[in-house]
């Protein structure tokens, strides 16, 4: 959908996301079996993981700490909580019940701020255990056509935090921004590695549509969203599907739908039935959780700066607003904001620093950069001593071999043209292209923009790239 | 069966351990004698589902080797022990007397099994029980009932009937059972041995196949009170693998058995001496109270009418937890599988074929009690009744150190005599309240009823009240001599 | 007999519990469950308003362990006890429908 959140017939979409994040612990939620991705099948298992008769769960304290950590990062209230059993039969689940926090989750009532500044409410975040993994064999390899399935319980019992947003998300763009920001927070706080491709962060979307002022529509839960791209596409498709169905006089059934990345469609996986009676009751093998205030405060004090705070800090230093500058977001996401701040501190202008770090220093280990030298290089470019193209070449040598930008520029034979020499060259070019010049002189902004590119290109060709494009642009404007 | 004048139990645990440690007798001789005994006589009793003779002999030799080397062979050196078949034993079949687990060999040992081994005990095998510990007669075993060694036409009680019978028959001086609503105490009473349900959390449940997690406790059977104390001390104490384990060392009990009961306040619970309790059983409880009084205890009467509601609460809470605990028996990872085209059908077919009628009944009852629309009316209400029972005990223990009741309403009944499930449940009326409250309680033999069969008297104490409870039990035992 | 629980209720509960009951069993089960529930109705005479539920007999809180790797089981020993194994995984028949 090109127009954000706008649907036909005056409908708008209402989206809430449920994110399952695997916690970055060494062991499982309720036992000492390793929590490690990619091990040989059925090796990270112990009696508790397999739910063997007689086995008993013992809570991983680190998992609790990480849950509190994320709760605080999402501005939640951390409250006393209780584990419950969610009862249903499924071969991936060794005990045929899942231990999960139900009516007393550990984190409640928080919010997450998108880069746009909009706040998305967090209803709750609760601890639970992951299931094993089935591979479907025979038929199409998909669950429905398989002859049989093979179960690996390595993932069973891995600690999960399920983070449930309020239905405050109004477009696929916001859904992606929310998931992306949540992932950044999970990674920044060390709560999870947030790898969607390894399934350590999984997103389900609850989508409904309604007309403003009318009650919310029936929602469908969309599963199998393996990337942010899938999330965006699936939300758009599903909202559209619902509007089309309503337009055709159908009613929306409450159901779980599966996203198919290939076909770009969602399809019914299962309809919510009365049979979904999970018979929750307090887990009698575990005792209530009441983290004390001192511990919570200790965890709060140990929180790093969060992405939103870092964006704000960098934007302020660079003299831009975070909402305006895409580069700020990119730089923070790459973890290069400390480098950018150091460059600004060393005297380089903020706007140029953002461009440098975003475009040229993205793949570089920020701690290995000679801040003073790069700051000096930025200053040379800004002063017109080097063109952007030349500066880029100098930077490459600087990062590879070290040295000062002045020495490197000299070695490479980069002498920025003086304004006089540049002016003379430009005179010649203008004389050679009178028609273009006339159009430039009398044209509107659009025409001028196009022809600026033309003249800069001609000057560059004539000077083998040693001209400063910005200076040429300025001179063109001055003459017209 | 033994003649009346031949002692059924020739030698107790303490005597064996002492003799083995002193080198007067070898653990191997003890093991061989006990294995011989049960080989000839267990055909009638059927106390054991599995006898691990080879392992027992090997373990006994290891104990003897320690003794020869001058090392400490442990407090239970060479003492044979029977294990209820719901305690996990590595490499040894652990079936819970159910077809669904027939032949299942756990890959790990229960904490209590590890502790027994560390103490030098020699396990003889796995004792019969009601399937998944659900029953009061041992008739619900999928592998045939156990008979009462005192009278083979009678039940040994249940669910730990095999453990109680093993001790009563002299097959083993000690046995472990589990008690969710009376499953140690009631068979102890019916077989004429001592049976103890410790405070909830006093003994690790790790490796005990769960029936009802908030009620289950493992506890000892022994021929006398002192042996029971020794076994409890061995298996008790904190275990980090059980979140509900009390974070303390096992209490010292043996050292207090000779303390006597002078000044101990004993309350006879009048509500459990009237309706539904056989007259001869009630008479033995009153006689035990007199014995305690004669030994110096301050005996009084106390009415706790709330206890009568324990049965109702229990038969909703225990099945509810069981319905969830027994979900894992689905034919995927271990135990029985009945083949079917789809996993869902396979699970249903497996569970339908693998569980016996009583287990199904309780799974159904518990599933219903937790299901949408009925949770508050049944499970929720039962949890409130549980609170009332805890409060009622609290009031009673303001005036008394221990309480006295019958263990079972009757002496051992005939096999096949009780077919109505509800009537069978009523056998647990005296024992259930302690499970609901998490309190310790034990059954001590105190003479016989009108039919000449043993009667057990139950001593109840508040949480962690094992020492006064055992002191009272020792005095009752003394009064029976 | 009482209407405390219907045959349909019992059939529904059997489905939830993954048990199959034939007609006779359904009849017997309905009667037996109704009898137990009837007996349990004795608690209706108790004043339970405002009484806190007791889910657990111990007043323990915050029982946990450190995040330290412990022993794992031997895979071969575990798989040896499984009804069906393929490629070191537990084999099950076709799974219809998704995970709830």
Image (tube, coloured by chain):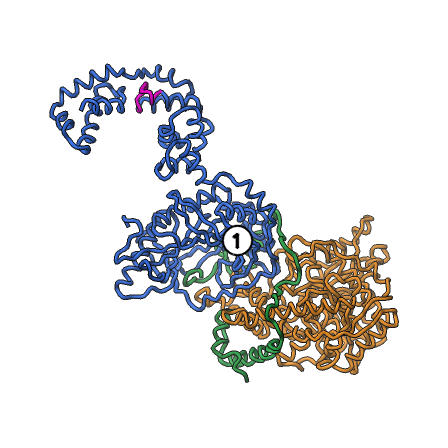
Residues drawn in magenta: A380-388
Q: Is residue A285 visible?
A: yes
Q: Which chain is blue?
A: A
Identified at 19% across, 34% down, the residue is A446
Q: Which chain is orange?
A: B
Tag 1: Cα neighbours inside 10 Å, few (<14), some, or many (≥20)?
Answer: many
As rendered, which of C40 and A345 lies closer to the eye?
A345
Identified at 14% across, 25% down, the residue is A437
Give x and y (percent) for residue A207. Answer: 36, 57
The quarter of the image holding the N terminus of chain B is bottom right
Indicate left or right for A114 with B314 as reference: left
The part of the image, by quadrant, that contains residue A247 is: bottom left
Which colour is chain C painted? green
The part of the image, by quadrant, that contains residue C43 is: bottom right
As rendered, which of B1 and B433 lies closer to the eye?
B433
Identified at 88% across, 69% down, the residue is B296
Give x and y (percent) for residue A79. Answer: 55, 53
**Residue A181 drawn above or below residue B436:** above
The quarter of the image holding the C terminus of chain B is bottom right
Membership of B115 in magenta stretch: no
Residue carrying label 1:
A127
As rendered, which of A18 and A474 lies closer to the eye?
A474
| Chain letter for the residue marked with disc 1 in the picture | A
Q: Is residue B43 visible?
A: no
Q: Secondary structure at mark 1?
A: strand
Membership of A381 in magenta stretch: yes
Indicate left or right for B192 with C92 as reference: right
Give x and y (percent) for residue A7. Answer: 28, 55
Q: Residue furthest front?
A: A213
**Residue B367 drawn above or below residue A138:** below
């Amino acid at each position: 959908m090109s127009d954000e959140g706008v649907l036909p017939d005056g409908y708008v979409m209402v989206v809430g996301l449920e994110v399952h994040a695997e916690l970055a612990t060494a062991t499982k939620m309720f036992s000492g079996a390793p929590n490690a991705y990619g091990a040989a099948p059925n090796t990270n298992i112990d009696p508790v993981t397999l739910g063997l008769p007689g086995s008993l769960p013992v809570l991983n304290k680190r998992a609790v700490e990480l849950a509190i950590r994320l709760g605080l990062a999402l501005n939640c209230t951390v409250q006393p909580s209780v584990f419950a059993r969610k009862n249903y039969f499924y071969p991936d689940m060794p005990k045929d019940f899942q231990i999960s926090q139900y009516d007393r989750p550990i984190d409640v009532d928080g919010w997450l701020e998108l880069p746009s500044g909009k706040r998305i409410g967090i209803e709750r975040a609760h601890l639970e255990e992951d299931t094993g993994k089935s591979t479907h064999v025979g038929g199409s390899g998909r669950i429905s056509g398989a002859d049989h399935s093979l179960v690996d319980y390595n993932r069973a019992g891995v600690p999960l935090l399920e983070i449930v947003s309020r239905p405050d998300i109004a477009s696929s763009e916001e859904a992606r921004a929310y998931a992306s920001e949540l992932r950044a927070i999970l990674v920044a706080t060390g709560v999870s590695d947030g790898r969607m491709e390894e399934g350590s962060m999984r997103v389900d979307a609850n989508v409904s549509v309604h007309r403003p002022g009318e009650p919310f529509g029936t929602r469908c839960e969309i599963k199998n969203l393996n990337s942010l791209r899938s999330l965006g596409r699936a939300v758009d498709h599903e909202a559209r599907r619902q509007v089309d169905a309503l337009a055709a006089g159908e009613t929306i059934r409450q159901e779980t739908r599966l996203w198919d990345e290939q076909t770009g469609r969602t399809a019914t996986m299962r309809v919510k039935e009365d049979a979904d009676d999970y018979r929750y009751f307090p887990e009698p093998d575990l005792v209530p959780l009441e983290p004390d205030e001192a511990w919570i405060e200790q965890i709060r004090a140990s929180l790093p700066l969060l992405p939103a705070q870092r964006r704000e800090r960098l934007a302020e230093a660079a003299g831009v607003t975070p909402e305006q500058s895409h580069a700020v977001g990119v730089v923070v996401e790459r973890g290069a904001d400390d480098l950018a701040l150091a460059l600004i501190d060393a005297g380089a202008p903020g706007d140029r620093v953002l461009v440098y770090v975003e475009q040229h220093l993205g793949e570089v280990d920020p701690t290995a950069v000679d801040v003073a030298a790069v700051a000096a290089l930025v200053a040379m470019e800004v002063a017109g001593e080097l063109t952007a193209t030349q500066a880029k070449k100098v930077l490459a040598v600087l990062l590879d071999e070290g040295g000062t930008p002045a020495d490197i520029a000299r070695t490479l034979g980069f002498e920025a043209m003086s304004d006089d020499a540049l002016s003379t060259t430009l005179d010649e070019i203008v004389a050679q292209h009178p028609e273009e010049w006339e159009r430039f002189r009398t044209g509107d902004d659009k025409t001028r923009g196009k022809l600026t590119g033309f003249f800069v290109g001609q000057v560059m060709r004539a000077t083998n790239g040693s001209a400063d494009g910005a200076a040429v642009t300025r001179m063109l404007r001055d003459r017209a | 069966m033994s003649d009346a004048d031949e002692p059924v139990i020739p030698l107790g645990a303490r005597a064996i351990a002492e003799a083995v440690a002193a080198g007067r007798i070898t653990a191997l001789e003890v093991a061989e004698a006990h294995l011989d005994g049960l080989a000839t006589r267990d055909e009638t009793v059927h106390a054991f589902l599995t006898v691990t003779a080879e392992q027992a002999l090997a373990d006994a030799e290891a104990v003897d080797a320690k003794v020869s080397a001058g090392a400490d062979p442990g407090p239970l050196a060479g003492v044979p022990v029977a294990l209820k078949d719901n305690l996990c034993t590595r490499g040894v079949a652990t079936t819970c007397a159910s077809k669904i687990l027939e032949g299942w060999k756990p890959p790990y040992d229960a904490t209590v099994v590890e502790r027994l081994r560390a103490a030098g005990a020699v396990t003889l095998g796995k004792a019969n029980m009601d399937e998944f510990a659900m029953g009061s007669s041992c008739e619900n075993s999928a592998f045939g009932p156990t008979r009462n060694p005192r009278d083979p036409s009678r039940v040994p009680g249940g669910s730990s009937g095999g453990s109680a019978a093993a001790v009563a028959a002299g097959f083993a001086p000690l046995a472990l059972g589990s008690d969710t609503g009376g499953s140690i105490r009631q068979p102890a009473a019916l077989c004429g041995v001592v049976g103890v349900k410790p405070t909830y959390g006093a003994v690790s449940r790790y490796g005990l196949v769960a029936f009802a997690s908030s009620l289950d406790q493992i506890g000892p059977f022994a021929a006398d009170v002192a042996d029971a104390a020794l076994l409890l001390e061995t298996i008790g104490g904190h275990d980090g693998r059980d979140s509900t384990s009390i974070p303390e060392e096992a209490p010292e009990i043996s050292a207090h058995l000779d303390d006597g009961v002078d000044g101990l306040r004993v309350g006879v619970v009048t509500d459990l001496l009237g309706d539904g309790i056989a007259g001869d059983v009630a008479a033995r409880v009153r006689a035990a109270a007199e014995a305690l009084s004669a030994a110096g205890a301050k005996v009084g009467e106390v009415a706790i009418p709330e206890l009568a509601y324990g049965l109702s609460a229990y038969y909703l809470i225990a099945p509810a937890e069981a319905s969830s605990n027994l979900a894992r028996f689905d034919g995927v990872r271990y135990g029985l599988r009945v083949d079917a085209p789809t996993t869902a059908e396979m699970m249903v077919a497996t569970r339908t074929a693998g569980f016996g009628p009583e287990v199904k009944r309780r799974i159904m009852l518990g599933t219903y009690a937790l299901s949408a629309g009925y949770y508050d009316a049944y499970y929720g209400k039962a949890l409130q009744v549980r609170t009332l029972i805890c409060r009622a005990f609290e009031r009673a223990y303001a005036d008394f150190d221990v309480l006295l009741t019958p263990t079972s309403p009757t002496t051992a009944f005939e096999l096949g005599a009780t077919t109505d499930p509800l009537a069978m449940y009523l056998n647990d009326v005296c024992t259930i309240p302690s499970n609901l409250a998490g309190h310790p309680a034990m059954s001590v033999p105190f003479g016989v009823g009108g039919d000449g069969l043993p009667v057990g008297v139950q001593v109840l104490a508040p949480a962690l009240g094992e020492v006064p409870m055992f002191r009272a039990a020792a005095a009752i035992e003394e009064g029976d001599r | 007999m009482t209407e405390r629980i219907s045959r349909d209720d019992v059939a529904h509960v059997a489905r939830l519990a993954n048990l199959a009951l034939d007609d006779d069993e359904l009849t017997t089960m309905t009667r037996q469950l109704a009898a137990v529930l009837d007996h349990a109705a004795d608690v209706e005479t108790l004043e339970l308003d405002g009484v806190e539920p007791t889910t657990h007999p111990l007043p323990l809180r915050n029982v946990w362990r450190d995040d330290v790797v412990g022993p794992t089981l031997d895979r071969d020993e575990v798989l040896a006890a499984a009804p069906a194994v393929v490629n070191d995984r537990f084999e099950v028949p076709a799974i219809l429908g998704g995970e709830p």
